[in-house]
Image (cartoon, helix red, strand yellow):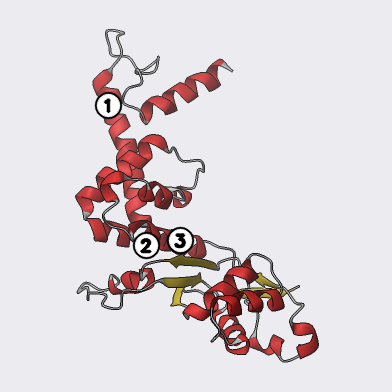
């Protein structure tokens, strides 16, 4: 228990400059070695901020490297890694951005970060064969409404009041073109095969996929979608989402 407590104190001191230097970090004279521990502490922050920059490259582009580094260091100060896999670090970063006062003027920044977080989760998700379009041909119209579809393990829906899909796509190029169509967008992030795909969904299909992913039957999801948009087309939405690889199986 004493060793565990010393580990906890060491880890806490690494991410909080106000914490005292842990016992055992001493100079040749036996006093606390502030300078040596400061170098180690800085290396930890550099590693964590680099991990965030690698996971959120478009977020960094939108605010610039200097601002992003400061924001990332502020996040790292209150959020230690909870997994030995550094690829998992930053799942809470989008929510942190949403409440980070200096970033409030970039109103779409947190949602773009949510898209990027979903992208990395999709990239590392389990490999699984997506539901084939041919699976729909054997389904009778009388039972279709009662079925529930299981989402593909890589699939995630990110909905925003801002055109996050268009912003993300524009920043995939060195020469960034301005986004002129400024309206809400919902994005399906999915990796049915080797490549992570980012699809901007038709607005009338968003409520349908939200309901299906929450466990609703196809009939219930269609009713939810029609309540949001009377132009919703059940057949087109279902075929389109299956074609994109959004599902893995039918219950």
**What's the residue at 45%, 52% (across, down)?**
87
**Residue 39 horizontal/vertical position (percent):** 26, 30
**Quadrant of the rendered structure where residue 232 is?**
bottom right
User: Marks 1 and 3: in contact by CB < 8 Å?
Assistant: no
**Residue 231 horizontal/vertical position (percent):** 54, 87
Question: Looking at this view, is 159 or 18 the one in front?
Answer: 159
* Label placed on residue 112: 2
Image quadrant where one finds the C terminus: bottom right
**What's the residue at 59%, 76% (across, down)?**
227
**What's the residue at 47%, 81% (across, down)?**
202
Q: Is residue 7 left or right of residue 78?
A: right
Q: Is residue 199 left or right of residue 65?
A: right
Question: Mark 2: which secondary structure?
Answer: helix
Question: Mark 3: which secondary structure?
Answer: helix
* Residue under numbered circle 3: 120
Image quadrant where one finds the N terminus: top right
Query: Reading the chain from its start, which is encountered first: label 3 or label 1?
Result: 1
* Residue under numbered circle 1: 38
Q: CA distance from mark 2 to mark 3?
A: 13 Å
Q: Is residue 209 above or below residue 16?
A: below
User: Marks 3 and 2: in contact by CB < 8 Å?
Assistant: no
Specify few, some or many for label 1: CA neighbours under 10 Å numbering under 14, 14-19, or 20 or more: some
**Quadrant of the rendered structure where residue 151 is?**
bottom right
* Label placed on residue 1: none
Question: Mark 1: which secondary structure?
Answer: helix
Query: Reading the chain from its start, which is encountered first: label 2 or label 1?
Result: 1
Question: Looking at this view, is 46 or 185 the one in front?
Answer: 185
Specify few, some or many for label 2: CA neighbours under 10 Å numbering under 14, 14-19, or 20 or more: many
Q: Is residue 70 left or right of residue 56?
A: left
Eye-nearest disc, 2 or 3: 2
**What's the residue at 27%, 11% (across, down)?**
28
Residue 196 can be seen, yes or no: no
């Amino acid at each position: 228990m004493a060793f565990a407590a010393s580990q906890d104190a060491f880890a806490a001191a690494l991410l909080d400059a106000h914490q005292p230097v842990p016992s055992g970090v001493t100079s040749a004279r036996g006093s606390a070695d502030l300078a040596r521990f400061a170098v180690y502490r800085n290396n930890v922050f550099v590693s964590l901020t680099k991990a965030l920059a690698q996971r959120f490259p478009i977020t960094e582009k939108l605010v610039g490297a200097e601002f992003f580094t400061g924001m990332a260091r502020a996040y790292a100060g209150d959020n230690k890694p909870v997994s030995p896999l550094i690829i998992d670090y930053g799942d809470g970063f989008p929510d942190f951005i949403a409440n980070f006062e200096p970033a409030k003027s970039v109103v779409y920044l947190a949602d773009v970060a949510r898209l990027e977080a979903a992208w990395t989760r999709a990239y590392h998700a389990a490999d699984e064969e997506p539901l084939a379009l041919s699976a729909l041909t054997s389904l009778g119209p009388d039972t279709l409404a009662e079925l529930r579809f299981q989402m593909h393990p890589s699939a995630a829906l990110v909905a925003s009041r801002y055109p996050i899909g268009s912003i993300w796509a524009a920043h995939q190029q060195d020469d960034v073109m301005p986004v002129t169509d400024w309206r809400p967008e919902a994005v399906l992030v999915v990796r049915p095969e080797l490549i992570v795909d980012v699809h901007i969904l038709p607005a009338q299909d968003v409520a349908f996929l939200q309901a299906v992913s929450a466990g609703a039957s196809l009939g219930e999801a269609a009713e939810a979608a029609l309540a949001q948009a009377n132009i919703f087309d059940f057949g087109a939405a279902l075929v389109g989402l299956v074609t994109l690889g959004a599902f893995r199986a039918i219950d």
